Amino acid sequence: MRNQVVISGELIALEGLRYTPAGVARVALTLRHSSQQSEADGVRQVQCEVDALAFAGVAEKVTRFAIGQSVKVRGFLAQRSMRSRQLVLHINDIILE
Amino acid sequence: MRNQVVISGELIALEGLRYTPAGVARVALTLRHSSQQSEADGVRQVQCEVDALAFAGVAEKVTRFAIGQSVKVRGFLAQRSMRSRQLVLHINDIILE
């Protein structure tokens, strides 16, 4: 089952490095994306804020970025928690845009 | 700015065809995705429900699908509305999985 996201955006929030109960590094961040996307024979102005999580080595890589930087991330969508339908992007890789 | 999503899932909700004020066909639907994704040197069981929208020809194509079918969609993420941060997937293409 496919679940792939590639999205660019400005880093607008970046929490400090934390660790899961199993000792895995974890970072929460938020991207602000804005672009024009083609849809239904026209162009749609798109804006969204994407809450994201990074773990282990990717979390450590994320901490080297700074708020305000434009980044491109690759990852997958998941539910925030068992009780919340809100979508969160799990980041497998992040690079400067 | 990149904004690309490819995700598979079961069609669990499918509204009837409606039209925007500009007369463009519009359909709202929900996918339930579940898979295993690799993350931080491990495997994560992923589950999420993705609210999605399709317009014009893609909306008409969507109406030919039925609840319970497994589909794969390609599209982009956007904010539900100016007032809601909730993410909605805008579908550019949909095929049977």
Image: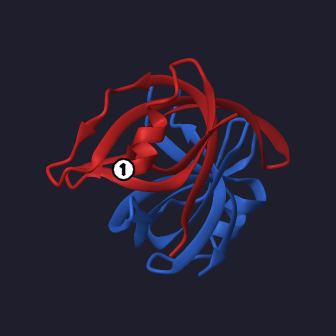
Chain colours: A red, B blue
Which image quarter: residue B36?
Answer: bottom left
Task: Name the residue located 72 percent from the left edge and 61 percent from the top edge.
Answer: B58
**x, y (%) of residue B77?**
58, 44
Q: Is residue A89 above or below residue A96?
A: below
Q: Which residue is mark 1?
A: A56
As rendered, which of A22 and B20 lies closer to the eye? A22
Q: Is residue B22 left or right of residue B35?
A: right
Observer-nearest of B90 and B76: B76
Which amino acid type is shown beneath numbered disc 1?
Ala
Which residue is situated farthest in the top direction here? Answer: A68
Identify the residue at image location x=74%, y=46%: B24
Q: Quadrant of residue A27?
A: top left
Pinpoint residue B86: horizontal percent, then vertical percent.
Answer: 43, 37
Of the pair B84 and B1, the residue shown nearer to us: B1
Quarter the N terminus of chain B occupies? top right
Question: Quick check: A85 above or below B67?
Answer: above
Please, which chain is the residue tagged with disc 1 on?
A
Looking at the image, residue B11 sits to the left or right of residue A72; the answer is left
Relative image position of residue B70 (x, y in whole percent):
51, 79
Q: Position of residue B91 (x, y in %)?
A: 65, 56
Q: Is residue A95 above or below residue B36?
A: above
- How packed mark 1 is, by other alpha carbons closer than 10 Å (few <14, some 14-19, many 20 or more), is some
Q: Residue at x 34, y 64 (%)?
A: B47
Looking at the image, which is closer to me, B92 or A35? A35
* Quadrant where the C terminus of chain B is found in the figure: bottom right
Disc 1, SS: helix
Q: How many marks?
A: 1
Residue B33 in view here: no
- Residue A10, can we see it? yes
The answer to whether A27 appears left or right of B71 in the picture is: left
